[in-house]
Image: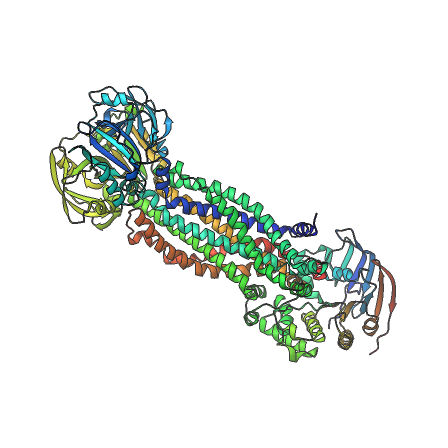
Amino acid sequence: MTATWRAIRATVRRRRVQTFVIGLVVLVSAATATVALTLISAASRPFDRSFDAQHGAHLVLVLDATKAPAVQPPVDRSAGVQAVAGPFPRAVLNLPADSSDAVGLGALTVVGRADPGGPVDRLDLWAGRWATAPGEIVLNAAPSDAESGPGRLGARIEVPGRSALTIVGRAYSVSQTADAWVPPDQIVALGPTTAQVLYRFADADTPAAVAAHASAVTDGLPQGALLGSQSWLTVRQAVAAGPGAYIPFLTTFGLLGLAVAILIIGNVVSGAVVSGFRHIGVLKALGFTPRQVVLVYISIALLPAMVATVLGTGLGYLVARSVLSDAFSGSGFGGNVGVAWWVPVVVLVAVPAVVVVAALVPAARAYRLSAAEAISAGSARRAGRCLGVQRWLSGTRLPRAVSLGLGQPFARPARTALTLAAVVLGVATVVFAGGLAATVSRYAEVSDVNNAAPIAMRPGNPAFGQVAPELDAAQTEALLRALPGVAHLSVSTVVPVTIAGQTRTMSGGFLRGDTDAGLAGMIVEGRWLRGEDEIVVPTAVLNERGFGVGEDVALQFGGRIRKVSIVGATLSSGVGSADFFAGWQTLDALAPGYQLPSSDLFYQIEQTPGTDVADLVRRVNAATPGLYAWDNRGTNSFSSSVLSLSITLSVLLGLVAALGVLNTVLLTVRERRRDLGILKSIGMRPSQVVTMTVVSMAALGIFGGILGTPLGVLAHRLIVPLTARAAQIDTPGFLLNVWDVPVVLLLPLAGLVIATIGALLPARSAARLPIGQVLRSE
Amino acid sequence: MPLEGDESGQIVSLTDLCKEFPDGTRALSGVSLHIRPGEAVAVMGPSGCGKSTLLNLVAGVDRPTSGSVVVHDEDLSQLNETGLALFRRRRIGMVFQFFNLLEDLPALDNVALAGQLAGVPTAQARQRARERLTELGVGDRADAYPATLSGGERQRVAVARALMNEPALLLADEPTGALDSASGAQVADLLLALNQRGQTLLLVTHDQMLAERVATRVVELADGAIIGERVLEQTA
């Protein structure tokens, strides 16, 4: 064993506490960095990653089956075509919603495919098996819809005029090429009128590139054969809106995490080397070369750091996987947005590199110092800086333990600055996360029509094995209104309608009852519904369709057209919700005599003050057979994901910041052992030692809180609108003004909490310092 | 200066005192020593004989393995850490070989600190500290930081701090050990003057000259045990 290695081992053993702190800080920092980098990586291209994994279709052509050739087009690589699949026969089934197990499917686009693989649009068959026999069908659904999505395995879909289809599998197509797939033999039986051809191109990043490719590949088609096409960019824009909301948010958290981690590592490691100057001098006096000494001091930081980096990266990997699964599974990307391979590699290389750099700066000074100078630098009783401040404090009326504590941060300005920066970032993170959580909660409260009230209910559907309701809609409403504790009741349904002049169907949300109670808060422009022939439209739909508040549009259902006015804009209510809202009388006018299946009605109840929601849910369920009520609070998956992310990352970063404080106090206590011994020898009580030590950091914490709070608020004001824009959501003032003045004044206490938690443990150890031993050894 | 002792007329009663450190080193074995008010007792002996350990036990900064330490009627073994801190604050003052002043505070605030910790209001503590410094001949150095003081001046400041709360007992551990002979003589004169004004002293030193100049009684310690004791007559 070499002398250098012996020195390293001896030093690590002698400084167990320091080694432990370095290890702990690096572990948490590596975990935070892993989570942060993963979030940045995943947030940047969640759709693209999933799309690439499935060899998604850059272009889907829908062709007239009677005019287009039935053979697969060639792969013309010179024209930039990478792969082609199809033509696959395609049929659209119009399913009465009440007559099949696939409730809510409505119009179902079915494609005939022999298998889920192929050169383009490789489906993720995540449940059941592929449809291989006549009468079998596989539905398109994201894995996250396993519990709530349509079409349980084994269920039958009744197709009017044809044989029923049995659901044998559930697969997911990021390209959204179909609603369902059947074997090629079966599609023939369904009477396909169109066919789809799927293309992948070498370059399809811009609308112009896709359009050029589309033009090239459709150039030779017979007149009238091309019925339509779908660019992957359109799908990406629509599907990625949900996860897109996470991008600025996750990136900000990621950058904050990295900054805090680097600061704390620098603080801890450089402090460890500085506090070892005397030992460095002794080693030099024994004959160690300057290089050997530097090696020893880098190693004592690097050894625990490397072990901690490996453990921290593993921990971060687990946390990141869980966070990503929460964040993206709702959009179907959960399975494909794993931790990128380069993230652990970067963390495993970069974190030890940061440790080495942080150690090199003070170690370089040790390299230059002579043995005597190093011993002197490590042993000298140096006065601190800013002595005037300490003198002024000693003259105040504050208790002496408090004034001594307040003066301590001034004695080591550089260390104080690093610790302060960590606290500032920690507080900013906590404030930002808190604000974001409040914004998201408010958004969830007002934006989602399906979460407008604490209690929700649907009549039973026998196709799901549920009991059919005994009462009709009017009787059900009367029964519910008569129940004690019911304050407001609203009923809604979604009906597909078209707008004259536009081809794509819109989901119309029609409402009756006490809709003003919860839903009117959604309005961000104009006003809420007052009467017939009025609609309010989510801002995202307004933007997408090019409408504006005050305009008139013509709704079309069946053969009837009804002119309505757009009287207000609402917050977008996310994927799967209505494209506009209107009163029930508008539906009656648009579709007189239209018979809604009872299971298409959605009831929401707001309870009177003091009524227990769970109890009311029980009473509703017991009121009559065929009513299925549930506690509807906190079911918004978007807000739940953001809240869980906020809490996870805030706890991690708060912990790292507190560890930074703990390290600073440990170093300070180590340096001030003699002073503490003196103070105790002249009668300072243990509780006063604790007070002094905690106050020294608490002051820093409050100051950090005062600086970090506006930083966090500013980040919230900047990031949230960016986040919202990415998700095509407007951010009216009430979503941003989430802090009251008293709350803002209390927010700096977050710094106090972080600093106090970090300082308490070493403060207690300082209070227990044995005076005799300290004064004898110093 | 306080002169009162306990019921037995003694200010310090050490009975069968033993101290063994965690590494097995036996620093004191069976030491019994009694000091009356107004006495100046010098404990002498070679390095490692247990002199400083004895002083630390009397000051309550360390605890004996066995035996009892009673100072000014207080059995230190019955006191917890807070009780010991209050005891040090009210009953004793300590002077160290290397002065042990806080480098961040000027002389005045180093002295005043002892009073402030005892609850004396800041203005009053500073006033009293200034008086102590003046009495000890370093009043003009009140605003100087320790690093700018000479060794003798630092030790005077340390003595002033030790006397700040008018302790019943002044403990001094090699008070001239880090001083040149001239400064050492000045500190010796200072301690002598204090004792002559009634201050009880317990002094640990190697310095025969200092012991003979200041002490009224010399206790010889070797290998943790008292091997001799003699009474001296002070020379004014």
From the top left corner, tell me how far across and down residue B100 is, in percent: 68, 67
Position of A135 compared to A700: left or right?
left
Q: What count of labels does the image hold?
A: 0
Q: Position of residue A190 (x, y in %)?
A: 22, 23
In the depicted view, which residue is nearer to us: A235 or B100? Answer: A235
**Residue A90 percent coordinates (x, y):** 23, 28
Q: Is residue B61 visible?
A: no
Q: In which quadrant is the C terminus of chain A drawn?
A: bottom right
**The quarter of the displayed image where residue B195 is located:** bottom right
Q: Is residue A152 left or right of residue B144?
A: left
Please name the residue shown 36% across and 35% down the image: A54
Which residue is located at x 68 percent, y 52 percent? A4
Q: Is residue A392 above or below residue A643?
A: below
The quarter of the displayed image where residue B174 is located: bottom right
Above or below: residue A730 compared with residue B33? above
Q: Is residue A262 above or below residue A83?
A: below
Front residue of A286/A778: it is A286
Q: Is residue A137 visible?
A: yes
Q: How did the renderer colour the structure?
A: rainbow
Residue closest to the far front: A78
Near-viewer residue (A530 or A213): A213
Q: Position of residue A701 (x, y in %)?
A: 49, 59
